[in-house]
Amino acid sequence: MRDTAQLQLQKCWPHAQITTVDSGAKALSLIDQQLFDVALIDMIMPDMDGMQVTRQIRLQFPAIAAHMPILALTANTNPVDRERCLAAGMNEVLHKPMDTAMLVRMVSHHIALARTGQA
């Protein structure tokens, strides 16, 4: 899934720097070291789930990182799970398999909101 998302993002934004990691702990460490425009976080990871990662970002990081748009990636289409993601602090939920047009819309929308201070 991570490779598919990276390929789709690179195709849509060929000049973007896309960073991937394979665990929530690595994601938190990286976010602590540098700023990102948006985070796409898989709901299922080896060490912690996407909601745990999101809560830590929202509660424990400086405002500039804490307000970064976070989009969940999940295969689960249950509306209850979507609400749990949003309650954890995610901005939106994208379903697998990812629709490229939806991915572009959501990433563009949330980056634009963040840049205008509306996120």
Image (spheres, grey):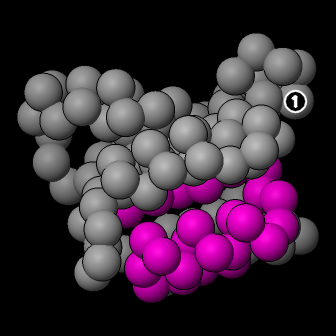
Give the x, y percent position of residue 3: 48, 82
Q: Nearer the viewer, residue 83 or 51?
A: 51
Magenta stretch in the rendered image: 19-42
Quadrant of the snapshot with the C terminus? top right
Q: Amino acid at mark 1?
A: Arg
Quadrant of the snapshot with the N terminus? bottom left
Residue denoted by label 1: 115
Q: Residues within 10 Å of mark 1 (few under 14, many from 20)?
A: few
Q: Is residue 69 in the magenta section?
A: no
Give the x, y percent position of residue 14: 82, 70
Judging from the image, what secondary structure is the residue with disc 1 in?
helix
When the figure is inspected, residue 42 is found, relative to residue 95, above or below; the finding is below
Q: Residue at x 58, y 67 (%)?
A: 28
Does 76 sit left or right of 69 as displayed?
A: left
Q: Is residue 26 in the magenta section?
A: yes
Give the x, y percent position of residue 90: 46, 36
